[in-house]
Amino acid sequence: MPGDHYEALPDPDKAYPVVRLLVKHGNALALASGAGIVLAGLGCAVAGLGWGWLPAGLAVGGFVGLLLRSYVELVRLITDMLLPR
């Protein structure tokens, strides 16, 4: 019917691919992001830019990992409550 305003719901397995990616691989992404920042701090310290980069990399890497992990948990909570299964 051309005047039908009710469309079929999207397939839940194909809808929201980024949300599905975060639900599935979020912990690994958070860990990799934090570890990458720590390694960057270590690399700066070894390259001769000063040893202050190592504790800075540890602090910022830990904070970013924790922040991303909390974001992943929020996405999982919202997904569990709102998206159909």
Image (cartoon, rainbow, N blue to C red):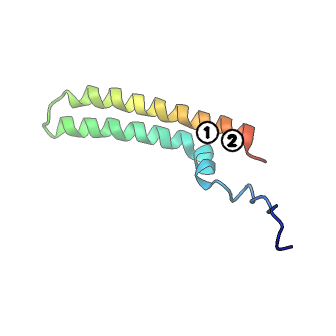
Tell me which residue sits at (61%, 48%) in the image: 19
- Left/right placement of residue 69 relative to residue 7 reads left
Inspect the image, locate mark 2, and give the three-letter code of the amino acid beneath it.
Thr
Inspect the image, locate mark 1, and give the three-letter code of the amino acid beneath it.
Val
Q: Secondary structure at mark 2?
A: helix
> Which quadrant holds the N terminus?
bottom right
Q: Badge 2 local density, few (<14 within 10 Å), some, or many (20+)?
A: some
**Callouts 2 and 1 close, C-beta under 8 Å:** yes
**According to the image, label 1 marks what residue?**
75
Residue found at the very far bottom of the displayed protein: 2
- Left/right placement of residue 39 relative to residue 19 reads left
Q: In the image, residue 71 lies at what x, y percent?
A: 54, 35
Tell me which residue sits at (74%, 55%) in the image: 12
Residue found at the very far right of the displayed protein: 1
Q: Secondary structure at mark 1?
A: helix
> Height in image: 10 above or below 53?
below
Q: Nearer the viewer, residue 46 or 18?
A: 18
**According to the image, label 2 marks what residue?**
79
Q: Nearer the viewer, residue 18 or 46?
A: 18
- Left/right placement of residue 10 relative to residue 39 reads right
Q: In the image, residue 53 lies at what x, y percent?
A: 22, 31
| Quadrant of the image occupied by residue 37 | top left
Q: In the image, residue 14 lies at what x, y percent?
A: 69, 59
Mark sitting on residue 46 = none
Q: Nearer the viewer, residue 75 or 38?
A: 75
| Quadrant of the image occupied by residue 42 | top left
Tell me which residue sits at (19%, 34%) in the image: 45
Tell me which residue sits at (54%, 39%) in the image: 27
Q: Badge 1 local density, few (<14 within 10 Å), some, or many (20+)?
A: some
Q: In the image, residue 64 lies at what x, y percent?
A: 41, 33
